[in-house]
Image (spheres, grey):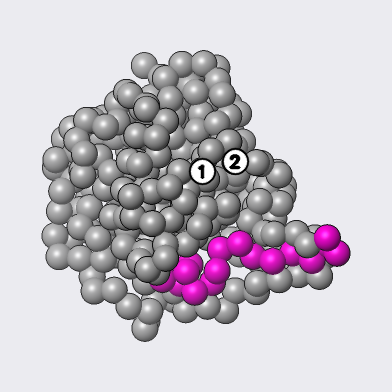
Amino acid sequence: MLIPDYHVNTSTGPTIAIYDLGGSGPPLLLAHATGLCGAVLSPIAAHLRDNFSCVLIDERAHGNSTSPPDGNFDWHLFAQDILDVIDYLDLSQVYGFGHSCGGASLLLAEEARPHTFAALYCYEPVIFPSDTPMPPGKDGNHLAQGALRRRTSFPTRQEAYDNFSSKEPFNKFTDECLDLYIDNGFWKTPKGTLHLKCDRKDESAVYSLGMSHDAYRHLHEVSCPVTLACGAEDVFLGPDVQKIFLDRLPDAQLEVFDGLGHFGPVQDPERIAMSILNALAK
């Protein structure tokens, strides 16, 4: 289990847990997908520490970070949390890797404060490809509805492992990434019972707002180099959608991974890490 090195009291309410994994070179901040936690990206970071000083975060209401007191999960606030972390650590010329919500949050952060990042690598950032965002809501949002049905506790770790290893999308995780999710995404009681850290109502709220931010409207303002990446097998945020984003970004490239889907960073961490290295370590 990873232990946070710092806790940042953000300007918008929640406390964000930070994990300094060390390494050599410029700082690289890694931001995870909704429902997961920073620890699942540590296998990617392990391949990058010869070139970057790697920092993981738990996003608001995930892992060891706290929920916002006002229950606000507007995705612009995820971006502000990232900026608060960067300020707290006094980082400059920082690089960023983000998966899904993490990728969108990095782009929103760069839009909010231009020239924060030297370059970004975003694996399937969740962005609605329109200048008019979708209204928030859980009705008809299968991810928001599914989160409300999430099982929140398990009598033993083995039962948790058996549960997740037999169902989508967790059955596509590497064994290491699944272990990291279970050991860092759940509280363990002295009796061995596991309880989910990310409240399912909070997770549902995050999903309900996922297409309601305006990152797409401002993509043309992102001046730093951006690598967009996606799995060839993903229908919703795959190559066709990423090409729409690519056309609006001033300095961007696209990498498509055969055999991977939306959870590529935890399906094949080494492959994604090598791509990040080729894109950012120039």
- Above or below: residue 77 compared with residue 166: above
Count residues near mark 2 (Cα–Cα under 10 Å), then give few for <14, some for 14-19, many for 20+. some
Residue sitting at the far bottom: 139
Q: Residues within 10 Å of mark 1 (few under 14, many from 20)?
A: some
Going 47% across and 48% down the picture, which residue do you hit?
16
Mark 1 vs mark 2, foreground winner is 1
* Residue type beneath disc 1: His
Q: Secondary structure at mark 2?
A: loop
Magenta stretch contains residue 193: yes
Query: What are the residue bounds of the magenta stretch?
Result: 190-206
Q: Amino acid at mark 2?
A: Pro
Give the side of residue 265 with respect to residue 129, left or right. Answer: right
In the rendered image, residue 205, in percent from the top left (x then y), is placed at 41, 71
Displayed quadrant of residue 96: top left
Q: Nearer the viewer, residue 147 or 168?
A: 147
- Residue shown at the point (14%, 40%) measured from the top left: 221
Tell me the quarter of the image containing the C terminus.
top left
The residue that label 2 is drawn on is 4
The quarter of the picture where residue 142 lies is bottom left
Above or below 89: residue 125? below
Q: In the image, 189: left or right of 23?
A: right
Residue 7, numbered circle: 1
Circles 1 and 2 in contact, beta carbons < 8 Å? yes
